[in-house]
Amino acid sequence: MSNLIKKLEYMYKLHKRNAKIYFKPILTPKNEPLITNSIHWIGHSTILINLYNKILVTDPVTSLSLGHLKRLIRPSKNLSGIKLDYILLSHCHMDHLNFSTLRKLNKDAVVFCPKNSVYPLKLLGFKKIHALSPNEEFKYKDISIKTLEANHDGRRYYLGKESKSNSYLIKEKSKSIFFAGDTAYTNEYKNLKADIALMPVGCYKPNEFQKMHCSPEQSFKMFKMMNSKTMIPIHYKTYILAQDSDLETYEILKRLNDGSIKFLDIGETINI
């Protein structure tokens, strides 16, 4: 009974916070151009990447709502107007695998995903789908995409067995980017080498959520385990999905920052 009461209390607080912003105007982000060898934050876990003029996107979600949850700020790019070479999907949750967004993307893009995502992607019309398990790697000419195991149950609906979620290490020539997706704390990324690590920092309260989502402190600790130059925080500032606030998250990261965290606003671009 106590667990049920806690869940009801959580849902009440979540809906109350979302109700407060429901009739407020949605914010308009920056819209800096994507240039060769750069990263552009569209919002949440959606990152547009230009890697030697190959165009990749992670967890594309540009919907103005997730069910009844309103987006706080508009996506900075219209992905339907961009010719994508690669789409990387970390898992099946609706804030990472979004049918309304995927429906609008070019279907000749190569898609990487966990195995339980293949069927819906086929229904959406994608033809080049690579279902990757942890430690599998895709190579084509100069580009390589390796999968690591995130500590996150990736089932869309919590029925049946747990499903793995993917993190991705993307390399081409001298450049490398790590995209963690969604993850709780894990040692999986220890000694991983990347120029930039895209690390989730939101959706960690109440504390029970840290079974699935890392806190900002845990995210930074995982980053410091890596051999990576720069951490870019993602998975916040876009939707209200839990009880943590974006300002609280930012203040925690600001205190932790030793110069290796680069804060982006949604719509900003950074060179790799």
Image (cartoon, rainbow, N blue to C red):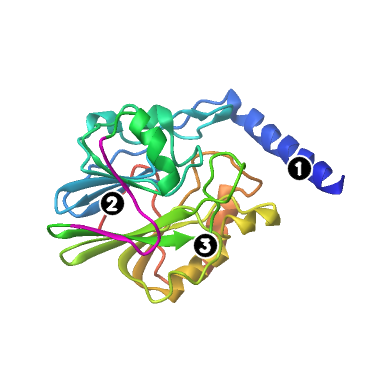
**Residue under label 3:** 253
Q: Position of residue 51 (x, y in %)?
A: 19, 53
Task: State left or right for residue 213 relative to residue 150.
Answer: right
Q: Position of residue 169 (x, y in %)?
A: 32, 61
The residue at the point 50 percent across, 44 percent down is 237
Q: CA distance from mark 1 to mark 2?
A: 37 Å
Residue 86 visible in this rendered orientation of the protein: yes
Is 149 or 62 nearer to us in this picture?
149
172 up-or-down from 111: above or below: below
The residue at the point 52 percent across, 67 percent down is 186
**Residue under label 2:** 39
Point out the tag, 3 or 2, that comes first from the N-terminus.
2
Q: Amino acid at mark 1?
A: Lys
Which of the two marks, 1 or 3, is nearer to us in this view?
1
SS at mark 1?
helix
The residue at the point 86 percent across, 48 percent down is 2
**Residue under label 1:** 7
